[in-house]
Amino acid sequence: MSDGSDGVGGAGSGNGAGGLDGGAAASDALGAAADALGAAVDALGEAIGNALGTATDALGLDNALDGLAGALGIDAKDLQGIVGAAVVGMLTGGLPGAVVGVVNGLVGGSLGEVARDAIAENVPAAMQPLANLAVDQLTRGIPGAGASVQDALAGLASGALTNGRAPDIGDIGAIARSLSDVRAAAGEVMGGIARGDFGSAADAVSALDRDFGGALAQARDVAAGVAGSLAQGQTAYASGGHGRFGDAVEQLAVDVGRLVASRR
């Protein structure tokens, strides 16, 4: 899996703190975050800037949700929605990082829901609590993964990432369609649980860790590729060639990038 140290690809991976080199780098990242968030979340961006200005080393992005929320004096759940995913992404990669943060949150949430459905259908009842606990652990470190699909889309539609203006309904519809494709393809990559090829709770957890981790790693790489194009001022498009799941994630990243860029 990507270790997140490259900035843009690291949103939600937990190791992005190494990319912030003292106060100057933190200031640059936060400046990009404030610009990308726009008027709708200026107050939150300023609060993040003030908190990290004195506590960057102590917090670290591996504690982005609980630690950052604590420093801001707000409830950690306020950073767990899709806007929170964008905020954490912006801290590590500006606007392209926000795209990766949103995609990571949407994909992580989709994988989690698909995994839980597969567990309910294919894992013996006695093994299900441990398997579901494993899913919780896998998604816990991904900002935005705890939000439902409806809440995530509502957050995007609210204009929180587009300078307070409601985005075009076509952009929201495109994200909803590509997210549906991601969820459908996720069932295939979670094959170990879907087939029930395990003999113990430990085997079920191992299958979850392998399939979930592999899918999330691919999603991060694909989304980082799209974000890289955006960072270079290029028009991002879905080139394909990543397999069904990877192609669905790529289209989702392109659609999210189009929506976030529409704030200008």
Image (spheres, grey):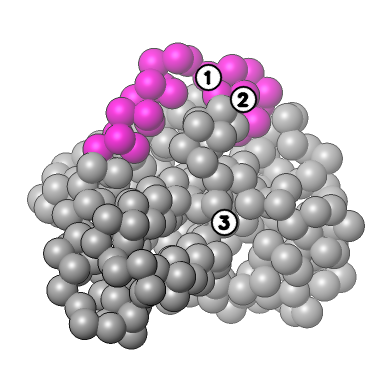
Comes first in the chain, label 3 or label 1: 3
Q: CA distance from mark 1 to mark 2?
A: 6 Å
Amino acid marked by disc 1? Pro
Provide the residue designation for mark 2: 159
- Quarter of the image for the N terminus: give it: bottom left
* Residue 195 position within the rendered picture, expressed as x and y whole percent measured from the top left: 15, 64
Please say whether residue 142 is visible from this viewpoint: yes
* Residue 160 position within the rendered picture, expressed as x and y whole percent measured from the top left: 65, 31
Magenta segment, which residues? 156-181
Up the image or down, 254 lies above or below 15; here it is above
User: What mark, if any, has residue 247 been given in the picture?
Assistant: none
Displayed quadrant of residue 49: bottom right
Left or right placement of residue 120 versus residue 142 in this view: left
Displayed quadrant of residue 182: top left
Asked if the residues shown at circle 1 and circle 2 are in contact, with their CB atoms under 8 angstroms apart, the answer is yes
* Residue 34 position within the rendered picture, expressed as x and y whole percent measured from the top left: 71, 44
Q: Secondary structure at mark 1?
A: loop
Provide the residue designation for mark 3: 143
